[in-house]
Image (cartoon, rainbow, N blue to C red):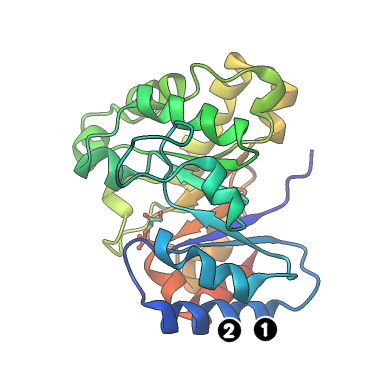
């Protein structure tokens, strides 16, 4: 089963429109018309449209960082899947550890968002990952397993193959501490086995599992060389075109 790498840049709450345009253009220009690797940019919601213009007609995909799981209506401040596809999104990041920690997002909410994303024809990137405390207490598989089961609880086998999972150990995010390729592969293999139990082995073999957490040009090749690591969800390094392109080249 060959899975195409997916390298996605999560810009988080960074950039302004001029920078966003320049960054997207630099990525688009370097990638050209054809790439063996899937690439996506996930800017802040207010800049989705300017980045959509920059990537229009190119292989670079657009992704959002969150959505609200409801149809249009009285939800002040929220953005739904229909709005995201309307401005050109193909992907949406869900359940990022920053949202889980800062906004108290739960697996049940991630599950609702996942259903809304799929109903709206978006590819969800479902994030999971343990804290340092969890890892030191040998709870990594328990925590990640609970997040996967909860976040995917309403997902059916037919749609499961199209989702993306991102394993992002919280202790590796923005800290410069990357999981070793062996540490990451161990959890990726665990996630794939669990996906096989929840769905089928064939479905699990199709689901892309990205690694995220201080991915840089210097460590990307070793991480992406592992059999169950199918791409990267990149934070800090995706804000510098050269670094992001270095990671894409590694893939
Ligand atoms: P960093 O690459 O900055 O560690 O962030 C990873 C991340 O959270 C991507 O979603």
- Image disc number at residue 122: none
Name the residue: 58% across, 15% down: 198
Picture quarter with ligand 1? bottom left
- Classify 36 as above or below 156: below
Residue 17 placement: quadrant: bottom left
Q: Residues within 10 Å of mark 2 (few under 14, many from 20)?
A: some
Label 1 near label 2: C-beta < 8 Å?
yes
Residue 8 placement: quadrant: bottom right
- Classify 165 as above or below 139: below
Picture coordinates of residue 251, whole percent (x, y): 65, 64
Picture coordinates of residue 85, whole percent (x, y): 60, 49
Q: CA distance from mark 2 to mark 1?
A: 5 Å
Q: Secondary structure at mark 1?
A: helix
The residue that mark 2 highlights is 26
Name the residue: 69% across, 70% down: 56
- Classify 158 as above or below 96: above
Name the residue: 36% across, 61% down: 12
In this rendering, position of residue 98 left or right of residue 153: left
Q: Nearer the viewer, residue 149 or 229?
A: 149
Residue 44 visible, this orientation: no
Name the residue: 37% across, 57% down: 178
Q: Residues within 10 Å of mark 1 (few under 14, many from 20)?
A: few
Residue 227 visible, this orientation: yes
The residue that mark 1 highlights is 29
């Amino acid at each position: 089963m060959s899975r195409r790498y997916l390298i996605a840049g999560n810009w988080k709450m960074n950039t302004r429109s001029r920078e966003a345009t320049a960054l997207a253009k630099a990525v688009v220009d370097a990638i050209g018309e054809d790439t063996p690797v899937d690439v996506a940019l996930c800017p802040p919601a207010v800049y989705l449209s300017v980045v959509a213009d920059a990537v229009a007609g190119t292989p670079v995909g657009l992704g959002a960082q969150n959505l609200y799981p409801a149809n249009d209506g009285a939800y002040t401040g929220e953005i739904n899947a229909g709005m995201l596809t309307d401005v050109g999104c193909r992907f949406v990041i869900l359940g990022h550890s920053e949202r889980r920690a800062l906004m108290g997002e739960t697996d049940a909410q991630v599950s609702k968002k996942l259903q809304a994303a799929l109903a709206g024809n978006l590819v969800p990137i479902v994030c999971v990952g343990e804290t340092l405390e969890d890892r030191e207490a040998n709870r990594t598989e328990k925590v990640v397993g609970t997040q996967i089961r909860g976040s995917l609880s309403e997902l059916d086998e037919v749609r499961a193959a199209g989702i993306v999972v991102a394993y992002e150990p919280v202790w590796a995010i923005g800290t410069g501490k990357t999981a070793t390729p062996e540490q990451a592969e161990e959890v990726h293999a665990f996630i794939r086995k669990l996906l096989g139990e929840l769905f089928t082995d064939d479905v699990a073999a199709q689901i892309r599992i990205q690694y995220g957490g201080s991915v840089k040009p210097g460590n990307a090749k070793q991480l992406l060389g592992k059999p169950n690591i199918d791409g990267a969800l990149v934070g800090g390094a995706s804000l510098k075109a050269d670094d992001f392109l270095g990671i894409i080249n590694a893939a």
